[in-house]
Amino acid sequence: MDEDIIFHSEYGDYFWAGIIIPVILGIVLSLVFKIWIIPLIFVLIIIFIIVASYYIRYTFRSDRLIVECPLALNEPPILYDDVTKVVCKRIFTYSLGMSSDSVLIYCGKRLVCISPKNKNEFVHILKEHCPGAVFEIG
């Protein structure tokens, strides 16, 4: 592969929860305390979530998959030779993405959970790079 292939994160339930919860809290707190600085703080949090989530991306390089997430520490690169298992399923725990519809990548003792847009295409490309890995697509 000569060129990098980049996927962005799917915007799902985690994304919307990260926006709706601060909005509701901002409204409730501003009504209770009659302070309008609180909604401004929550608006800034929402803007940060929206902007940062746009920059979550997964980059296929010739020898590794790079996961970049500005809301968390970036994962070390995933070397294709280290991938042992890939599972596609819905989870409701931590994910380096914005949706519970996730791809779990097991590499050595590490588990990386992501939620790419065009999940089927992403998994297809990952299969090409990791022929020795077990794929559980559900």
Image (tube, grey):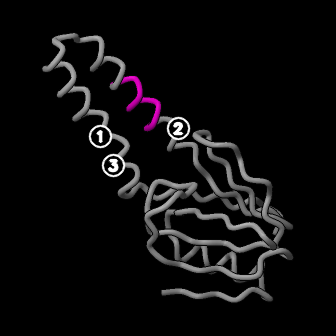
Three-letter amino acid code of the residue under disc 2: Ala
Residue 52 badge: 2
In the image, which is nearer the foreground, mark 1 or mark 3?
A: 1
When asked about the image quadrant of residue 58, the answer is: bottom right
State left or right for residue 32 relative to residue 92.
left
Three-letter amino acid code of the residue under disc 3: Trp
The Cα atoms of the two marked residues, 2 and 3, are separated by 14 Å
Label 3 crowd (10 A; few <14 / some 14-19 / many >=20): some
Q: Earlier in the sequence, mark 2 or mark 1?
A: 1
Q: Is residue 50 above or below residue 2?
A: above
Q: Residue at point 43% right, 38% down?
A: 50
Q: Which residue is mark 1?
A: 21
In the rendered image, which quarter contains the N terminus? bottom right
In the image, which is nearer the foreground, mark 2 or mark 1?
A: 1
Q: Is residue 36 above or below residue 27?
A: above
Label 1 crowd (10 A; few <14 / some 14-19 / many >=20): few
The Cα atoms of the two marked residues, 2 and 1, are separated by 17 Å
State left or right for residue 97 relative to residue 127.
left
Image: magenta residue range? 43-50
Q: Is residue 121 or residue 77 the one in the foreground? A: 77
State left or right for residue 24 relative to residue 45.
left
Q: Position of residue 96 (x, y in %)?
A: 58, 55
Q: Is residue 129 or residue 76 the one in the foreground? A: 76
Q: Residue at point 31% right, 17% down?
A: 40
Q: Which residue is mark 3?
A: 16
Q: Earlier in the sequence, mark 2 or mark 3?
A: 3
Q: Residue at point 75% right, 66% down?
A: 110
The Cα atoms of the two marked residues, 1 and 3, are separated by 8 Å
